[in-house]
Structures are given as structure tokens and as C-alpha cells.
Image: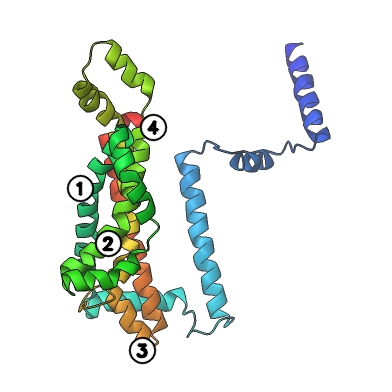
Amino acid sequence: MRQSVTAALLASQNMEGLSQGRPSNPVHRRIRAYLRPRATLSTRERMTISTFGILLFFSTWLIVTEADLIQPFFLPSPIAVGKRLFEMVAFEGYLFGVWSSAYRVFGGFLLAATVAIPVGILIGNFPFFRSLIEPLLSTARYLPATAFVPLMIIWLGINESQKIAVIFIGTFFPLALIIASISEGVSSDLMNSAYSLGASSRQVFFKVLLPACVPSIVDSLRITAGIAWTYVIVAELVGADSGMGIAILQAQRFLLTDQVIAGIAAVGILGVLTDLVFRFAHRKLFPYLY
């Protein structure tokens, strides 16, 4: 009797779903679940969807180029680009250029992080420093880093310090404002609870505020590390005799499209690897967030 009642209820629910235009097919239900805002996906589902997206992109690229829908001069096939990247790494000393660019990227990024973290924390928690510094930072962040290249050449010449300075400028301003927003967003209830328990301002700052900010600060460093990689081409525009950016610029002068795309892909690969390192470190440092 109970089974028949349960079957009747399920049948009525399916009929109701069909009458309201909701598909009862499991595949359709799963698709609707994927399109739901902030849907929960398993690790296997995320990996499957990501793999499908990558394969779809490269398959489309391969089909378009192999079918001669676009001339190889404008867009070489992914096979040609991969072959050219292998030749650059294996036979042309490209890894030395990778090291030069990585040195500049991480030099500028670490310098920016060293300055931006305390500045951002001060802006986010002390109204005095917010009123003093934030208007300048909010204005400066709209200035493109490329506009500072001539000025950096005048001030620093065309050596390594000029290139590191360009990357510093490109990453410092957004990082400082992101950290200011993070520290400002720490719950006031959390801080008031510490005050009510007898904590001093110093204790609240070092024992409550900073620990609450650190996980988000590390995540913001991951984001701005990616921004730093985008400025390596700009940093190497002038006076660079090695690096990934100069390799791309030299290939452009000789109309070597496959090498241009290979260089861009190499920058992207290193950016992704940097992102993965930060994600791994974030999971190891803050396992309670996962």
C-alpha cells in the first residue's frame, strides 16, 4: 500500500513538472542545475567541464586552420604553434629568456606586495590614513603602466631596475586597494567582541584583524601575480636583450606569426602555473576554508 502511494506521488510530481514546463529527464535536470546561480559541482564535474572547454577551443582552432578558413599567416594551426614553441625551448635557448622575464615579473611583484600589503591594511582600518592616501591611489590606478615607461627610462635608465619598476607600478595600485577593501571588510562584530573581552587596540590589530585578513590577502596576491605577468611585454619594450617579451617583439618584426602566438602561449602557461602554486599554497595554509 505504501509503495503504491509513493508511486502515485512521484507520478503526480512528474506530471506537475511537465505541466509547468519543467523537464523530468535526469540530463535536463542536471543541465538546469548547472545553470543555477552558485550551483554546487563535484570535483569530477568541474574537471570534466574544464577539459571539455579546452578541447572545444583547440578543436575549433584546429578545424578552422586545417580547413584553410583562415590563412596560416594570420592564424597558424595549434600544431604549428606547439612545434614552434618546442623548437624555441629545445634549440634556441628560450628558457634563458623565460628566466629573465620571470626574474623581472617576480621582482616587481614581490616589491609591490611588500609595499602594498601594509599600505592597504592602513587604509582599510585607519580613517586617518584612508583620507591621506586613498585619494592618491584611487587616481593613480587609472593611469596605465605604459605611460610611465618614458619616465622610468629618464629616472632609471634602460637597465633591469626600469623593467622591474614598470611591473611594480602595474601591480602596486590595484593590490593596495584590494587589500584595503579586504581589511575594511573584516566584521566589526568580531573586533567589538575582542574589545568587550578586554583586548587592547594592539591586540585587536595583531590577534584579530590581521589573522582575519591573511587568507584573503594571499588570494589577492594570486590575482595580482597574474596581472604582473601581463606587464612583462610592456616592461621589455625598451633596452631588453633577452626575455619573453623581446622574443615576441622580434618575431613580430619578421612576421613570424607562429612564434608570436607561441610566445604569448608561453606567458599564459607560466601565468597558469603561478596561479596553481598560489592555489596550492592557499589550500595548505588555510585548510579550514575548504
Q: Is residue 20 visible?
A: yes
In the rendered image, the quadrant that contains the C terminus is: top left
Residue 254: which disc?
A: 3
Q: In the displayed structure, would residue 53 be above or below residue 264?
A: above
Q: CA distance from mark 3 to mark 2?
A: 27 Å
Residue position for label 2: 167
Q: Position of residue 201 (x, y in %)?
A: 22, 22
Residue 185: which disc?
A: 4
Of the two numbered discs 3 and 1 on the same chain, state the one appearing first in sequence: 1
Query: Neighbour class for label 1 at 10 Å: few (<14), some, many (≥20)?
Result: few
Residue position for label 1: 114
Q: Amino acid at mark 4?
A: Gly
Secondary element under disc 4, as helix, strand or loop, is loop
Q: Is residue 282 visible?
A: no
Of the two numbered discs 1 and 2 on the same chain, state the one appearing first in sequence: 1
| Nearest-to-viewer mark from 4 and 3 | 4
Q: CA distance from mark 2 to mark 4?
A: 28 Å
Of the two numbered discs 2 and 4 on the same chain, state the one appearing first in sequence: 2
Secondary element under disc 1, as helix, strand or loop, is helix
Going by the image, does 203 lie left or right of 49? left
Q: Residue extending furthest right?
A: 19
Q: Position of residue 227 (x, y in %)?
A: 35, 57
Q: Amino acid at mark 1?
A: Thr
| Nearest-to-viewer mark from 3 and 1 | 1
Q: Position of residue 169 (x, y in %)?
A: 28, 59
